[in-house]
Image (tube, coloured by chain):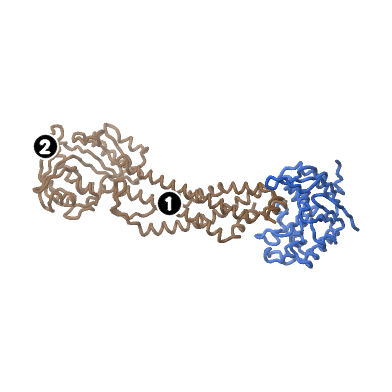
Chain colours: A brown, B blue
Amino acid sequence: MRTFMKLAWRNLFRNKRRTLIAGTAIGIGLAALIFVDALILGMEENMVQSATSSFLGEGQIHRDGFRDTQEVEKTINDLEGTVAGLEQEEIVKRFTLRTLSFGIITSPANINSITLVGVNPETEKWLSEIDDAIREGSYFEEHTGQAIVIGSELAEILEVELGDRIVITVARAESGDLSQEMFRISGIYSFGIREMDTGLAFVSLDKAQEMLGIGSGVHEIAIKFTDPEYGRDETHPFWKKYSRNGNEAIGWTTLLPQLEAAFELSQFGIFITAIILFGVVALGIINTLFMSLHERMFEFGVLRAVGTRPGRMFQLILFEAAALAVLSIALGVILGFGITLASNISGIDYRGIEFAGVTFKELLHPVLTLKQFIVYPIALFLFTSFVAIYPAWYAARLAPAAVIRKSL
Amino acid sequence: MEVNAQTEIIVAEGVSKTYSDHGVPVSAVKEIDLTIRTEDFAAIVGPSGSGKTTFLNIISGLDTVTEGKVWLNGKLLSEMSGRELSDFRRDNIGFIFQAYNLIPVLSVEENIEYIMLLQGVPKSERHSKVNKILAELGLSGFENRMPTQLSGGQQQRVAVARAMVSNPSIILADEPTANLDSKTGAELLDLMRELNKTSGMTFVFSTHDPMVMERAHRLVTLKDGQVVSDEIRE
């Protein structure tokens, strides 16, 4: 077997230019596959980060049905027990309590509908990036109940500035009576996401609870995990544990189904890239092997004549394909690693571009994983060996007398 | 038919071969009866298209017969599978072709030991046999050269060395001097004649080279695929 491996390796370099062209083509394909995979992983990471860290959190707990109706009465059941449980969870890094209600914001110049969010400023800053997104004023530094933080675009609509007064109107729980309160704008944020910059207004949790008449109740617990993947793993017992007492616990994949669908689409993209790559590989390998085979017909005849068994001929061609695969993989891995690492370091600027409802806020850094350098090369090697079966079978079946006669 | 394998190394009985050339049947060899005896130094001669190479391919198991039977070392070739034929050729026949005999990516030593590798001969034995045959053929010092670094005559000598090194019963040579100048061709033929005398190995040539005919002690002449004369010379 060693003799045939040696023979195959040397045969590969008989026509260096052809081997180099075929190897480079296959190598570029592998590099492209590695890069696309890394890019999509980076995109997913970036999108999840953008989507969950802005405001959403990686998981949420609500009262059953609240997400559909946003009824103010539907506060989380057994809040104390739930909070006590979350504090004990090893996988929970942080969590924060919120109230959410539809409301009207009114300035002397204009009026707009909003979602009024009651937050605990201390815990909220660990979950969302409102504090980081403040462009003017401050994030609840004034601990007065009348402080309100609004988005920059909402400020433009209302034609208000920092320190101006506005009026919030909400419907109270149970009675549905309107409750109005005047607030002073203490901070203006800008996420760069239109829906957030126009549609949300933040007040302190106790003030919101008071306006809504829900006592110490909350509508939402936003959660950040020690590993964001917990938010994706719908089978984790955490979700079942907190989906009881009339509450529901859900991860970001449920909260943002369009994101998961976009990821599935991306995976399909990788699959299609792989199919194209493997198609190119198949044609490249078959073409290279047959060209090489037809150039060496007499030699094959001699090898068969001196007693080389058909099975050995089959083996020789498979080894030649494997040698070409090894060379191509080496090229592809080096190229793929280089390109991906370079773009990982420099980052790709998609900031401000929206995809699947999420706006990229950070530079996109392709993610290098071991899988890209193990699974894809192994798959390519196996596939190359597989497509070489036909040329190998052809070589094994050559009638020695016929090929010698034809070659002379 | 009874074959005496001790004295009759190849027996061809009623051998015919018909090819299909684009659907037209071409009869290359017609009803040949021929026996090659042990230690023969025989030449199968005839003009181009007379069926020399086809007959050589048939008696070596490289090609099949349309009709008739061939025994080699007492074994009926038509009863063997492809794999058995490969093994049989490996162990019993040495081949020398007119050109491109050697595997270009293997060195002289690797080319010569190739058949022994297939036979599973241990490395030390292979090495000593290669050195011995290289010395006998005047090729000592050429072990590590690649075929492209050899002249045509040297390449044919290496081919002879490869054919003989595993000690087969018979050497079949198809136009071995066709690509050599007359001096080199004569030297190669003299070398093979000498080896035939000293080792007792049987040589069968397919040729139309007068130098081969001069040296052969048996001359089988083919014409239009049939044996027209079989002359034994002392």
Asked whether the beta carbons under mark 1 and mark 2 sit within 8 Å of each other, the answer is no
**Residue A232: image location, x then y, percent:** 35, 42
**Residue A26: image location, x then y, percent:** 50, 54
Between A28 and B181, the residue placed more toward the observer is B181
Is residue B203 visible to us here? no
Q: Residue at x 76, y 66 (%)?
A: B181
Q: Residue at x 38, y 46 (%)?
A: A266
The vertical placement of B114 against A213, above or below, is below
Q: Amino acid at mark 1?
A: Thr
Is residue A316 visible to us here? yes
Question: Disc 1 or 2, which lies upstream in sequence?
Answer: 2
Q: To which residue does mark 2 refer?
A: A178
Q: Residue at x 59, y 46 (%)?
A: A390
**Residue B159: image location, x then y, percent:** 74, 59
Task: Give the letter of the chain under mark 2.
Answer: A
The vertical placement of B154 against B114, above or below, is below
Q: Amino acid at mark 2?
A: Leu
**Residue B195: image location, x then y, percent:** 83, 60
Is residue A159 found left or right of A126 in the rendered image?
Answer: left
The circle on residue B179 is none
Q: CA distance from mark 1 to mark 2?
A: 55 Å
Is residue A199 found left or right of B47 in the rendered image?
Answer: left
Is residue B157 found left or right of A366 in the rendered image?
Answer: right
Q: To which residue does mark 1 refer?
A: A369
Q: Residues within 10 Å of mark 1 (few under 14, many from 20)?
A: few
